[in-house]
């Protein structure tokens, strides 16, 4: 899914919420699904891709965009304000 498609799908989900065809919980789930689909299919022309952290602690499940797994580890550590060397997670492409 490209960015424009994702935005259109979010717009449609919001429209359904505004018209009363969907409640907040269903709209939230729909938007999360759109975003997760966008992230898992994300690959840019400049080598960026989505990476996910798995393991124990706050980093588990975080997904970031980076050029490599080591860069993704650094980005996750920055987001959590932790030292990348002590971050106890595995980083893998989504």
Image (cartoon, rainbow, N blue to C red):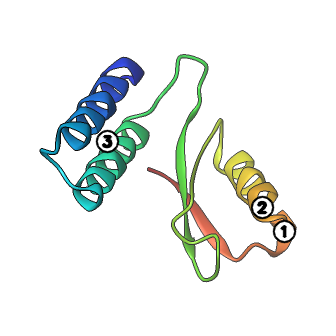
Residue 34 position, x and y percent, is 31, 42
Question: Which residue carries the number 3 mark?
Answer: 34
- Residue that sits furthest to the left in the current view: 21
- Residue that sits furthest to the front in the current view: 19
Count of marks placed on residues: 3
Placement of 59 over or under 29, stated as above or below: below
Please say if the residues under marks 1 and 3 sit with CB atoms less than 8 Å apart.
no
| Sequence-earlier tag: 3 or 2 | 3
User: Does residue 55 appear to the left or right of 9 in the view shown?
Assistant: right
Mark-to-mark CA distance, 3 and 2: 25 Å
Please say if the residues under marks 2 and 1 sit with CB atoms less than 8 Å apart.
yes
Determine which quarter of the picture holds residue 90: bottom right
Q: Secondary structure at mark 3?
A: helix
Q: For residue 74, which numbered disc appears in the image?
A: none
Residue at image point 32% right, 42% down: 37
Residue 88 position, x and y percent, is 70, 77
Bin the neighbour count of mark 2 within 10 Å (Cα to Cα): few under 14, some 14-19, many 20 and up.
some
Bin the neighbour count of mark 1 within 10 Å (Cα to Cα): few under 14, some 14-19, many 20 and up.
some
Please say if the residues under marks 3 and 2 sit with CB atoms less than 8 Å apart.
no
Nearest the viewer among 20 and 40 is 20
Bin the neighbour count of mark 3 within 10 Å (Cα to Cα): few under 14, some 14-19, many 20 and up.
some
Question: Which residue carries the number 1 mark?
Answer: 82
Placement of 50 over or under 29, stated as above or below: above
Q: Secondary structure at mark 1?
A: loop
Residue at image point 65% right, 35% down: 67
Nearest the viewer among 74 and 8 is 8
Q: Quadrant of the N terminus?
A: top left
Q: Secondary structure at mark 2?
A: helix
| Sequence-earlier tag: 1 or 3 | 3
Q: For residue 77, which numbered disc appears in the image?
A: 2
| Sequence-earlier tag: 2 or 1 | 2
Mark-to-mark CA distance, 2 and 1: 5 Å
């Amino acid at each position: 899914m490209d960015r424009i498609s994702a935005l259109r799908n979010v717009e449609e989900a919001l429209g359904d919420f505004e018209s009363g065809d969907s409640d907040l919980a269903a709209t939230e789930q729909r938007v999360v699904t759109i975003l997760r689909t966008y992230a898992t299919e994300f690959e840019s022309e400049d080598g960026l891709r989505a990476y996910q952290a798995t393991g124990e602690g706050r980093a588990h499940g975080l997904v970031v965009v980076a050029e490599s797994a080591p860069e993704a580890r650094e980005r996750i550590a920055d987001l959590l304000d932790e030292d990348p060397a002590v971050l106890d997670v595995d980083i893998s492409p989504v």
